Image: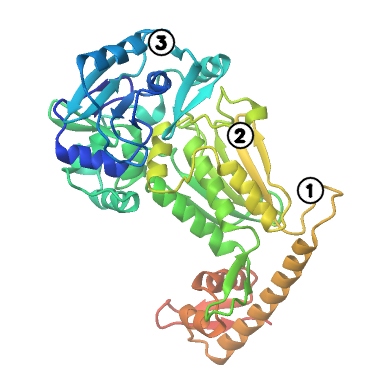
């Protein structure tokens, strides 16, 4: 199968290995399993309204091969259903033993409608939308999506990173039973032209050796500011290696600077409790990376940390076709290919559940509700404990007050203990400090960095062989 941003060309004579790979990958943005013809018209128009795809008739949702009784009458029945869609959906057929594969090309006259309405693909599901929502969606997105566009400046032999590809296969639980080009094509991130492997932007974002060699605007910028304004920058990092590494590196930046408290669990290791749940922050970063407008090259995904809040933003705002009142309830994807691959490696659990998860995690931690804003940018703001700007006048929960006091006391004790240990042994390492006090190395790094910025501590000599000097109490 060869894929591009405008149509789908299907390889004939599927073999056993390719079927096995499809079963391992499971249902996705371009693959649907069906045991019978029930509601097949929904999948036909959903694929036609999206990027095309394949329906495997004779396979259940649980990947069990039940088989289908394949006859010319069955094919004619499916063809009639496709012709009765408005406008007619173009289909073709492929057989492998007792499995009938229905190939649907991306439509050239969107939107497509069946008897029960308008549908489009959201991850591995077909989602119903109103006609106006679909019209507005395709007006804003057009028939060209950034994540599906081919980039001829990306060379397979020069820029492709096989190690990152191997990492993806491991995370997705996919066996590498086909050669790399065939697997890339099946994933929808590459195609073959004149004997060469050509990548679309999704493949580049995931599998580039160094993404900055191709795009500069795909950067995730993280910054720590002193105070509540964007004036004094205490720390800044720009991450632009690949989309998965960018997400992980942005989270590591936050973990480095967010205070944590510790709870005794009865186990040898204490449980770290950050002042803002890491899972909520991670969900917001992934949301920003997935839904950003990659056609906008003048802005980056931003992760900004202030004394009173953390803001995570992306260019592009709310995807048109999704009404503000449906925000958090329905999902319309600006970059469906990117979302599909992140879903396969379980960075996204379910399509459209991220906003609810962020809200629930904040509530469970006793925090004020995160604030969501969408204009030309989409921004989610997490208030740090003790801040009252968003919900001024609302009583703070007892849990939040207790958490804040506990965090402050724990931080003071940790600070005092660290300085005592450094005074006793100026050559002590951060790893040794972490083991003695019982916190993570990231926690030690956070305190050491703060000591140095506050003029309390200075490093004399190199990291190896040097020592610490306490400048003031």
Q: Quadrant of residue 413?
A: bottom right
Numbered circle sitting on residue 404: none
In the image, what residue occupies the spot 36% across and 40% down? Answer: 205
Looking at this view, is 412 or 291 the one in front? 291
| Percent x, y of residue 180 | 19, 43
- Placement of the N terminus among the 4 image quadrants: top left
- Placement of the C terminus among the 4 image quadrants: bottom right
- Label 3 sits on a secondary structure element that is loop
Crowding near the residue tagged with mark 3, few <14, some 14–19, many ≥20 C-alpha atoms within 10 Å:
some
- Label 1 sits on a secondary structure element that is loop
| Percent x, y of residue 63 | 31, 41
Whether residue 1 can be seen here: no
Crowding near the residue tagged with mark 1, few <14, some 14–19, many ≥20 C-alpha atoms within 10 Å:
few
Numbered circle sitting on residue 389: 1
- According to the image, label 3 marks what residue? 85
Q: Quadrant of residue 407?
A: bottom right
Numbered circle sitting on residue 329: 2
- Say which label, 3 or 1, has the lower sequence index: 3
Looking at this view, is 4 or 456 the one in front? 4
Q: CA distance from mark 1 to mark 2?
A: 26 Å
| Percent x, y of residue 231 | 66, 50
């Amino acid at each position: 199968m060869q894929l591009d941003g405008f149509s789908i060309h299907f390889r004939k004579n599927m073999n056993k290995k390719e079927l096995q790979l499809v079963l391992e990958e499971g249902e996705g943005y371009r693959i649907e399993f069906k045991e019978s013809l029930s509601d097949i018209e929904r999948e036909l128009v959903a694929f036609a309204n999206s990027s095309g795809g394949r329906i495997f008739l004779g396979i259940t949702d649980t990947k069990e091969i039940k088989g289908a009784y394949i006859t010319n009458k069955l094919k004619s029945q499916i063809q009639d259903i496709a012709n009765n869609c408005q406008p007619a959906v173009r289909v073709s057929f492929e057989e492998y033993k007792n499995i009938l594969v229905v190939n649907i090309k991306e439509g050239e006259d969107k939107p497509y409608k069946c008897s029960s309405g308008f549908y489009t693909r959201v991850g591995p599901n077909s989602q119903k939308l109103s006609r106006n929502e679909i019209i507005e969606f395709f007006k804003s997105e057009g028939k060209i999506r950034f994540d599906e566009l081919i980039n001829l400046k990306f060379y397979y032999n020069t820029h492709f990173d096989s190690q990152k590809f191997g990492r993806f296969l491991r995370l997705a639980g996919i066996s590498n039973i086909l050669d790399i080009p065939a697997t890339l094509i099946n994933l929808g991130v590459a195609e073959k032209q004149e004997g060469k492997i050509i990548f679309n932007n999704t493949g580049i974002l995931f599998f580039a050796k160094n993404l900055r060699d191709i795009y500069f605007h795909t950067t995730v910028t993280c910054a720590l500011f002193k105070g509540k304004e964007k004036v004094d920058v205490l720390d800044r990092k720009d991450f632009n290696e690949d989309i998965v590494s960018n997400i992980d590196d942005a989270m590591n930046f936050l973990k480095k600077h967010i205070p944590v408290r510790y709870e005794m669990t009865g186990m040898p290791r204490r449980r770290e409790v950050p002042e803002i749940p890491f899972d909520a922050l991670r969900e917001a970063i992934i949301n920003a990376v997935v839904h950003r407008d990659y056609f906008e090259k003048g802005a980056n995904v931003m992760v900004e940390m202030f004394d009173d809040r953390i803001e995570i933003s992306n260019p592009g705002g709310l995807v048109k076709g999704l009404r503000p009142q449906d925000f958090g309830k329905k999902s319309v994807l600006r970059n469906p290919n990117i979302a599909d691959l992140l879903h396969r490696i379980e960075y996204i659990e379910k399509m459209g559940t991220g906003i609810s998860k962020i809200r629930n995690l904040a509530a469970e931690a006793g925090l004020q509700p995160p604030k969501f804003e969408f204009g030309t940018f989409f921004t989610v703001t997490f208030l740090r404990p003790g801040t009252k700007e968003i919900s001024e006048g609302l009583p703070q929960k007892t849990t939040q007050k207790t958490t804040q006091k506990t965090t402050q006391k724990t931080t003071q004790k940790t600070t005092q203990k660290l300085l005592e240990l450094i005074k006793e042994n100026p050559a002590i390492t951060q790893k040794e400090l972490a083991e003695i006090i019982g916190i993570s190395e990231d926690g030690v790094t956070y305190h050491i960095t703060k000591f140095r910025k506050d003029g309390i501590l200075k490093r004399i000599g190199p990291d190896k062989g040097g020592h610490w000097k306490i400048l003031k109490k």
